[in-house]
Image (tube, grey):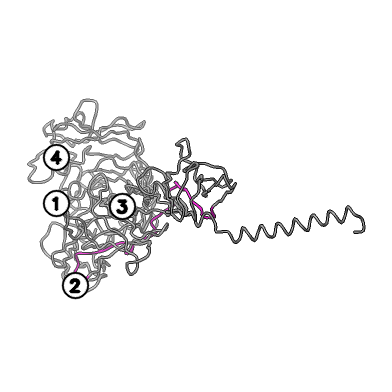
Amino acid sequence: MSRPLVRAVFAVLVVATIAAFFATQLLKSEFPLVIRFATKPAHFSPNSDGYRDETRVGFDLSEPAEVTFSVVDAEGNEVRRIVDEEMLAGDAKHRFSWDGRDDDGNRVPDGTYRMRVVRRDESRVIDSFKEIDIDTQPPRVRLASAEPSVIAPAAPGQDPRVTIRYDGPANSAPEFRVFRTDDGPRPYVVRRFRGIPPEGRGKTREGVWNGEISAGPDATTTAPDGDYAFTVTVRDRAGNPAVAPAEIPSPRTAAPRTGVSVRSFTLRGPLSVVKAGAVVNLEVGPVDRSFDFVLSRYGSPQPLRRGGRVGGRFRVGVPKDALTGLHLVRVRAGRQRAIWPLAVIGRPQTKAAGERGPDPVSGVGAGGLPLLVLPALTWQGLNREDDDGDGFADTLVTSQAVRLDRPLAGGGYPPRFNAEVAPLLRWLERERLGYNLTTDISLARGEPPLLGDAPGVAFAGSELWLPGEVLRRLREYVAEGGRIASFGTDSFRRTVELDGEQARDPSGRRRIDAFGERTALIETSLAPLSVFEDELGLFEGLSDLVGEFTEFEVSRGLAKPTEALTTAGRDPGEPAFIAFRLGDGWMLRTGTAQWTGQLEEAALSIEVPQVTKRIWRRLGTR
């Protein structure tokens, strides 16, 4: 410090520090030029959807000034100049619209932006701490649940409300739509409603459907039985909309337990065979109520059991002297009705085929009872019931699994029963032709009566799905001398796995069936079957033109060295009705699902009943 130069430098620094201090104090005491910056909304989405496409930005000046006002990005680069060197009034609010575009009219990238005011005559640059967020990405939204998954709004005393919850941005009034999914080729909207926050204020992530659908501009009505799916539309804080699970829901987009089934009255029970004298467990749903029940043999008005119950589950005893055949449990609660089919094994309807005298064509006398197989897997495979609560019916055509213990949709007969199975059962009853009885589910489970104990097997309808092991056993059964007659179409081509009370993993339709035959399904104008060859003598003494049909399953080739025995068809060279030898036995297809319909008394057919009786005798002959 003794040197003059050092003392001079030190003095200059002290003076500069004092000057800086006084300058800082002066600036602190000066009233700021920009009192505050403003933006509303602070989050917006300039995606041209008409909602929050722009924001209001601006500032409040404390005094008149010539300023430039801009929007800058996160790096401080100017992206849009809104005011360029304009004199603006002081003690005033200045607001402007910004559409999220730069000076060239291009939409700026999503991100965070700030505002900047520049007063060039004082070289002052003022940046806002307030941020503007641009976000054009839709939020992630998913339906989380719809509870309960089954309602009965028409049942007395029932609460039909369904609570739908979603994961995603909470909204003050999220929009929910209700789609009917089982009434036509595409789901359609039957109701719209808004979610209501608790106490009517704030935001929510749920809505409540009251079980009603629109019936006019200002009218509603109770939703009829059916399957319903939901969608929810919400917006995030930037205004981006999102619909979950999709604009129009589908089985592919709908998640389990996010839909609802409306059911007035249901009944479910076993689809395996039941022995006479056994007690059967059934269940009425979807809610407990008082009901009456009747057990009777199909086609007979005579009740075998009747009674009343209160509650869901109940038991019915099958009489020990019941005849073999399909029985029905009918339940009633008020105007509601439901039925359930029971395959009962009891006393035979009549004696074995050979004990009624020799066959007039073959001359064969000794025989036994054919085994009649009911297509319960097809019934449930086509049964339009929603198993997983996604709002869409589950079938083996549309889903990977279905329950075997679920109610039949509508409480009526199984799918295809009236068209394929019922006419055959009524005809057997009229003709007093005996049979043992099983279902394909019991066949797959190895429950008696067993396949090997029967001289012949008749499948009462289309067997669209069977476990692969059952298909293998059927082929072996024929090769070892068994006889099979199929009264359905498109059968023995698809496999399915049985896992307890579930049928899962259905295969696609195979080109060749389990017996090595290739076929094609065709529809034509009304036409009879023309007999081409008849080694089995099924058409002997009858007209060469049999029945009238519009649907045919045409044979396009047999596996070698398979030998055709009896054939008939609409066009030469394309048999639909076919019986062919396979090993020591034979396989027969009637070639049309309309065959059993010609067995009805009202059909006035002569040839079809005669041919069917001869098939039955052949099946009962060892």
- Magenta-highlighted residues: 128-157
Amino acid marked by disc 2: Ser
As drawn, the label of residue 608 is 4
Amino acid marked by disc 3: Phe
Label located before the other in sequence (1 or 4): 1
Q: Name the residue under label 3.
A: 392
Amino acid marked by disc 1: Arg
Relative to 166, say whether 538 is above or below: above
* Residue positioned 36% across, 59% down in the render: 257
Q: Mark 2 points at which residue?
A: 290
Nearest-to-viewer mark from 1 and 3: 3
Disc 2 and disc 1 in contact, CB within 8 angstroms: no
Nearest-to-viewer mark from 2 and 1: 2
Label located before the other in sequence (4 or 3): 3
> How far is mark 4 from mark 3, CA to CA?
40 Å
As drawn, the label of residue 167 is none
